[in-house]
Amino acid sequence: MLKFLQAEPHRTYTAEEVARSLTPQAAKDPQKKSQAIEEMTTGLRKLVEAGHAVEIGAGSFKARLFFDKEEKNIEHAFLGGMGNTLYGFRSPIFRLNIGVLSLFFVRDNLAAVWMVTIRDTTIGRDFSLTRRLRDGVYMIGSRPPEAGEVNYLQVEGRYIDKKQVTITLSGDEVGVEDHNTLNGSRIDLLTRDGLTRYEQLAEAFLRSTDPGEHKNIVKRGRFVLEKFLHSHQNFETSFFSAVVDSLLLTGAGSARRT
C-alpha cells in the first residue's frame, strides 16, 4: 500500500480508490468491496500513525513527500495539474509557491494573526503584505480586486492565474485549494521535528547576534552557511529566516535569551 502511494506522491487517494487498484476483483462483489475498503482504511490510518502518509481531509490520503531523504524537516505537496486540488495541514509556518513567488506565512499566536512575506525570485526582492491576516477564507490571484472583495489578495508575478488558490486559515490549521491552474501550486511546511530544529537554530542566532542585526538577511544567511560548514547540518535559509521572524514577532526570542 505504501509503495502504491509513493509511486505518485503528489496525488491523494480515498480508501475506495486504493482498494480498486490493489484488489480489482473485489469491485465485482459489493460485500468484498465493502470489506476491501474497510481494510484499506485501516491500513491507510496505520501508515498515517507511522508517519509515512498524511490524511489531508476526511478520507483523503497521500504519501508524505520529502525532497531531503536524510533530514525530514520540510514536507512538500503539489496541487493542481494532476487532479489533486485540495490540501490540508497544521503548521504555524509554511510556504505557498505560486508562479515565481514564494509566500511565507508566519502565525503570531499572541495576536492570532498571520504575517505574510513574499519573495519574488525573478528580481531578488522581498516584501510583506501591509495587513496581517486573521482567521478566515482568502482568495489569492493576479487580477485586480473587485468592489467589496475584502478577503481577496492580489499578487502579481509570472505564471500566476487570475484565480490561483483559496486558502483557509483557522488557528494553525490550514486548507488550500488550487483552482485547477495550469502550472499548479506548491505547499512546503515544517514538520514538528523540523520546526523544533529550526527554532533551536534561530534561538542560537538571536543569542549570538547583536539585536540591531537580527533582521539582517545577510547575517542570517552567513549563520546558516557556517552551521553547514562546521557541522554539515543543512538548513534552508528562507525557512530559517521565517522562523527567526516568528520568534521576533512573538517576542519569544527575547524571552528565551534572558
Image (cartoon, rainbow, N blue to C red):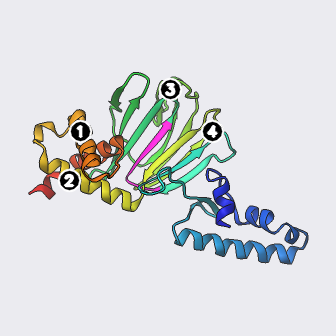
Q: Which mark is residue 179?
A: 4
Q: Earlier in the sequence, mark 1 or mark 2?
A: 2
Q: In the rendered image of this protein, does residue 32 appear above or below residue 61?
A: below
The front one of 109 and 243 is 243
Amino acid at dot 4: His
| Magenta stretch, overall SS | strand
Image location of residue 81, percent across then percent down = 66, 39
Is 23 on the left-hand or right-hand side of 137? right
Seen from the viewer's position, the closer of residues 177 and 99 is 99
Q: The magenta stretch spans which residues?
A: 90-97
Which of 32 and 171 lies nearest the eye of the viewer? Answer: 32
Relative side of 10 to 146, left or right: right
Marking on residue 240: none
Q: Is residue 75 above or below residue 218?
A: below
Q: How would you rate the neighbour count of disc 1 (Cα within 10 Å): few for under 14, some for 14-19, many for 20 or more?
A: few
Name the kind of residue labelled 2 in the image. Answer: Glu
Query: Where's residue 16, x and y in %?
Result: 75, 65
Q: Which residue is mark 1?
A: 222
The outermost residue toward the right is: 28
Q: Assign a secondary structure to mark 4.
A: loop
Bin the neighbour count of mark 2 within 10 Å (Cα to Cα): few under 14, some 14-19, many 20 and up: many
Residue at 59%, 74% in the rendered image:
46
Tell me how far mark 1 sits from mark 2, CA to CA: 15 Å
Q: Which residue is mark 2?
A: 203
- Tell me the amino acid under the disc marked 1: Arg
Q: Nearer the viewer, mark 4 or mark 1?
A: 1
